[in-house]
């Protein structure tokens, strides 16, 4: 897999995450996030499966007519590890997400850790 292929694969993972967020689609989140993945913020720490269960129960931004305006700020790759910095607006809040990804022996990228920052609201 070339570096361009890796970047595109990580963009695809980000798209799964954005779709999962926007549509409260736990199946897409399960594809993007590795089992045992940790989701960590200043006031929250969750295991992947508990976090995805909460997403499935949440009213989706799509159902509230929220715009689909998520964004990838950067992707850095070093061998089989990568960092993706994302901007994720959800339900009137804005988050910066830092995703750590690993490429498995099968060549598939998955998020193994997500740390996030909730921006102050104006």
Image (cartoon, rainbow, N blue to C red):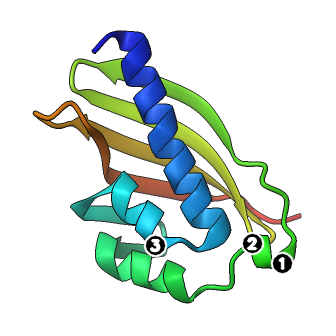
The image shows residue 5 at horizontal and vertical percentages of: 39, 18
SS at badge 2: loop
Residue at position x 54%, y 89% from top? 57
> Could you say where residue 70 lies in the image, as x and y percent from the top left?
70, 48
* Residue matched to label 2: 61
Residue 51 % position (x, y): 41, 77
Mark sitting on residue 64: 1
Residue drawn at point x = 30 percent, y = 45 percent:
110
Q: Secondary structure at mark 3?
A: helix
Residue at the image position 83 percent from the left and 78 percent from the top: 64
Q: CA–CA distance between discs 2 and 1?
A: 5 Å
Mark found first going from the N terminus, 3 or 2: 3
User: What distance separates the C-alpha of mark 1 from that of mark 3?
Assistant: 18 Å
Instruction: Tell which circle, 1 or 3, labels the residue nearer the N-terminal end.
Output: 3
- Residue 112 numbered mark, or none: none
Relative to 55, say whether 72 is above or below.
Answer: above
**Numbered-mark total:** 3
Which quadrant holds residue 1? top left
Q: Is residue 47 visible?
A: no
Q: Tag 2: Cα neighbours inside 10 Å, few (<14), some, or many (≥20)? A: some
Q: Which residue is mark 3?
A: 26
């Amino acid at each position: 897999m070339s570096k361009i292929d890796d970047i595109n694969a990580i963009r695809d993972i980000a798209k799964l995450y954005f779709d999962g967020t926007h549509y409260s689609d736990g199946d897409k989140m399960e594809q993007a996030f590795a089992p045992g993945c940790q989701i960590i913020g200043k006031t929250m720490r969750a295991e992947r499966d508990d976090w995805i269960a909460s997403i499935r129960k949440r009213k989706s931004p799509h159902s509230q007519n929220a715009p689909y305006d998520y964004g990838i700020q950067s992707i850095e790759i070093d061998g089989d590890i990568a960092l993706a910095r994302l901007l994720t607006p959800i339900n009137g809040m804005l988050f910066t997400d830092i995703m750590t990804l690993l490429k498995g022996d099968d060549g598939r990228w998955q998020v193994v850790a997500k740390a996030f920052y909730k921006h102050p609201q104006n």
